[in-house]
Amino acid sequence: MKRPAVLFLYTELAPYFLAGVERLVRDHDVDVHIVRWPVNKEAPFQLDLAERVHVHERGAYNDRELVRLCAGLRPAAAFASGWVDKGYLKVCRELHGQGVPTVMCSDTAWRGDLRQFAAIVSVQLWLRRTFTHAWVTGAAQARYAHYLGFHRDRIRTGFYTADVDRFAPLADLLDGPKRESFPKRLLCVARYIPTKGHQLLCDTFAALCKAGVAKDWELWIAGTGELHEAVMNSPSGRHERIRHLGFVQAPDMPDVMAQCGVFVLPSTFEPWGVVVHEHAAAGFPLVLSDAVGAGERFLLDTVNGYRFEAGNGASLAAMLRRIVESSDQELVAMGRESARLGGQWTPGDWANVVSDLMKKP
């Protein structure tokens, strides 16, 4: 008997997404077809594909050819990245008309601005003919999906998941090397783009060092992007206790993380942030701006880390000082709570949602 096929109409592929796809193939005996956009130069992941996962390059098909390809796959369900690609919408509209579950996937949070109110008015005319369900990341995203016209019983959360199996073993260090001597290194993993807040982080940490309150802590930053050279060569970015690692491939990331103790993400705009889930699963205390959506699920303020006001250097400095002034025992306890929270959502759970949506009319 032919296996069911699942179709993903995607933008940028990442290892965490493929971890969920691998569990879907393994646990639910399906074939997966992925249409993807070109690799992002600021996130040049080297990707390994599981068996029965077939990738189609979006650029190889015009809209009509794409509809023909996808309809010919006869998928049991189709999942599309929002409504950014008009060709993807045409595919979903065709499949929707055939009675196939079609799922809009999104990490866009409800902000209540004029642009979103305009979207609510404009998209409802065609949304119901295109998608049967919405699968979003968290509560703010679910609110937006509901305003767009999806009934609450047709909205699921948890669209993003970390590759927990890759990162969870690092939490074992909390009962070994990290308990004996907690690593005095802050780690930030993010693209060097304006909304990630690298310059503010470097400026703030360098100021703490100058004031003599950073003790023996260091700051490591992994990533690349348009602001990499500017931040790295800024006065604070050149500080002797700040290290810029460049882009780190997913298989190499655990080696970096094993040498660090606390995760920091100072974004001024971050609808979700899978990297937060990754570091929570790995047992890291978290310091997140209040713009980071994933804090909703993985940060209990003052329990496994601290939240600060996005873009506010004084607020960030205060939270970093609380980390620096914490004992090793307190940091280990924070890390254990992070690991508990990070382990509550896995690629296996993600695959179960896909399987469930395949059965929905």
Image (tube, rainbow, N blue to C red):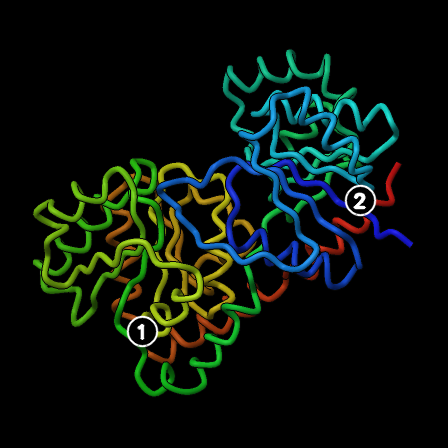
340 shown above or below 233: below
Q: CA distance from mark 2 to mark 1?
A: 40 Å
- Please, what is the three-letter code of the amino acid marked with disc 1? Gln
Q: Are marks 2 and 1 in contact (CB under 8 Å)?
A: no
- Residue beneath the point at 60% across and 44% down: 137
Give how far across and how far down residue 173 sits, in percent. 43, 81
Q: Give the mark nearer the N terminus: 2 vs 1.
A: 1
Q: Secondary structure at mark 2?
A: helix
Q: Nearer the viewer, residue 257 or 334?
A: 257
Which quarter of the figure has residue 87? top right
Left or right, 202 with reference to 23: left
Can the viewer see residue 153 in this picture? no
- Please, what is the three-letter code of the amino acid marked with disc 2? Leu
Which quarter of the figure has residue 180? bottom left
Q: Secondary structure at mark 1?
A: loop
Left or right, 215 with reference to 50: left
* Location of mark 2 (residue): 357
- Residue beneath the point at 10% across and 53% down: 238
- The disc placed on residue 227 is none
- Residue beneath the point at 60% across and 27% down: 61
Furthest toward the right, the residue is 1
Can the viewer see residue 319 in this picture? yes
Give how far across and how far down residue 336 sits, in percent. 49, 74
Question: Where, quadrant-wise, is the N terminus in this rendering?
Answer: bottom right
Q: Nearer the viewer, residue 21 or 175?
A: 21
Q: Nearer the viewer, residue 199 or 222?
A: 222
* Location of mark 1 (residue): 259
Give how far across and how far down residue 58 sits, in percent. 57, 32
47 shown above or below 342: above
Count neighbours of disc 1 (C-alpha within 10 A) and say few if under 14, some if 14 to 19, many if 20 or more. some
- Residue beneath the point at 37% across and 56% down: 287
Count neighbours of disc 2 (C-alpha within 10 A) and say few if under 14, some if 14 to 19, many if 20 or more. many
